[in-house]
Amino acid sequence: MDLRANAENDVTNTSNSDSQRSRKIKFEYEDEDQDEALDETVTESSNLEDDALMCDPDDSIIGGDRTSADYYFDSYSHFGIHEEMLKDTVRTKTYQNVIYNNTFLFKDKIVLDVGAGTGILSLFCAKVGAKHVYAVECSHMADMAQEIVRVNGFSDVITVLKGKIEEIELPVPQVDIIVSEWMGYFLLFENMLNTVLYARDKWLVNSGVVLPDKASLYLTAIEDADYKEDKIEFWNNVYGFNMSCIKKQSMMEPLVDTVDQNQIVTNCQLLKTMDISKMAPGDASFTAPFKLVAERDDYIHALVAYFDVTFTHCHKLTGFSTGPKSRATHWKQTVLYLEDVLTICEGEALVGSMTVSQNKKNPRDVDIMIKYSLNGRRCLVSRTQYFRMR
């Protein structure tokens, strides 16, 4: 896809409205060093420090017929991905603290663990007195989870069910709690959220609890000249040959990487908050406006998205952030490179909108459309860009 052929290059005059910057959500994270091994000691609540916070892509992308839907469940049969998630102490310790510090939620309750993996969340729930836990896992890791449950002495409390949530039948008509670590890169990649919502609508009692129950997506802008040169402009001249046709496609693929907070040029804008206990499946597709105000004179090479999740039913509001100002997680951040290098002055605003939707052919992939414009003293630009996470 020739992005420039689809770009809107006309200069536009943006509004000078005095809309406020997005309200930031605060978390506190009080925990051991990230490299510390997991244990069964209850720690302080794992709240993170504050980090703030459709489209019609070309189907001619090389390899476009290979998608995450083709290998999604098989990929979770490999041990490495589970090791990475378990060693993400921000992630795993937060879930452990939520369960261990709020036993009133789980005592004598029936729990459904959606996408159980190794069964770690089910084990946490069983340990604090859940009446029964149904751990549903579609990949071959379900067989390992069954053995893990057995060797840890919880076979009478945890039942591992191998299969898709949409296809299995639980031995009980309802559950009291649904717990799941469903979040993907860019929050929505892999589309596991809809599986959680399906389970909620089919089995959760009216007064039931979904954990976590809130998720918020944020956007900011960064200076990233060196990395963009290395990852994108590289294709212009590869050992003396023009490979810029790859550059056009690489621009469409968001980069998952860790961003240095010193690269951030603007404020952080809240795009969308999802209430998992109430939202409809279609709510995960949305269009949200943004206004990113420069906090210094600098260049903008990319937009960066990240998310927070919160557990609001706890004694103490608990959650974590995947933003660049917080402790690193395996989700990192999602970097969307802009075609233009924007020169922005302090106080000027990059305004636009982001549209997010499931890919029509492959619902585990995410289509993103960004419209942006800058009417600054040194830069005038208006453009639309398309991205696909796959």
Image (spheres, grey):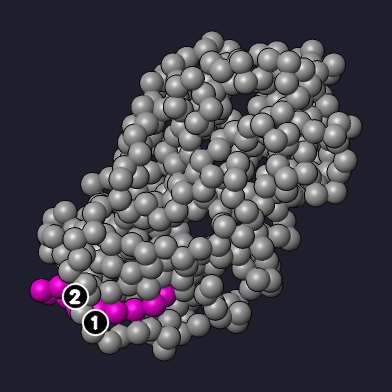
- Amino acid carrying mark 2 in the image: Asn
From the top left corner, tell me how far across and down residue 376 is, in percent.
15, 73
Q: What SS does tag 1 mark?
A: loop
Mark 2 sits on what residue?
Answer: 375
Compared to residue 299, the image places residue 89 above or below, namely above
Q: Is residue 29 visible?
A: yes
Residue 214 is left or right of residue 65, and the answer is left
**Furthest residue to the top?**
41
From the top left corner, tell me how far across and down residue 159 is, in percent.
83, 26
Q: Which quadrant of the figure contains the C terminus? A: bottom right
In the drawing, what numbered circle is on residue 92? none
Mark 1 sits on what residue?
Answer: 12
Q: Residue at x 51, y 48 (%)?
A: 274
Compared to residue 224, the image places residue 179 above or below, namely above
Q: How many marks?
A: 2
Q: Residues within 10 Å of mark 1 (few under 14, many from 20)?
A: some
Q: What SS does tag 2 mark?
A: strand
First in sequence: mark 2 or mark 1?
1
Residue 321 is left or right of residue 178, and the answer is left
Q: Is residue 82 visible?
A: no
Compared to residue 45, the image places residue 188 above or below, namely below
Front residue (pair 384, 13): 13
Residue 53 is left or right of residue 225, and the answer is right
- Amino acid carrying mark 1 in the image: Thr
Q: Main secondary structure of the magenta part?
A: strand
Q: Which residues are magenta?
A: 375-385
Are the residues tagged 2 and 1 within 8 Å (C-beta)? yes
Q: Residue at x 51, y 40 (%)?
A: 214
Residue 181 occupies which quadrant of the picture?
top right
From the top left corner, tell me how far across and down residue 78 is, in percent.
71, 42
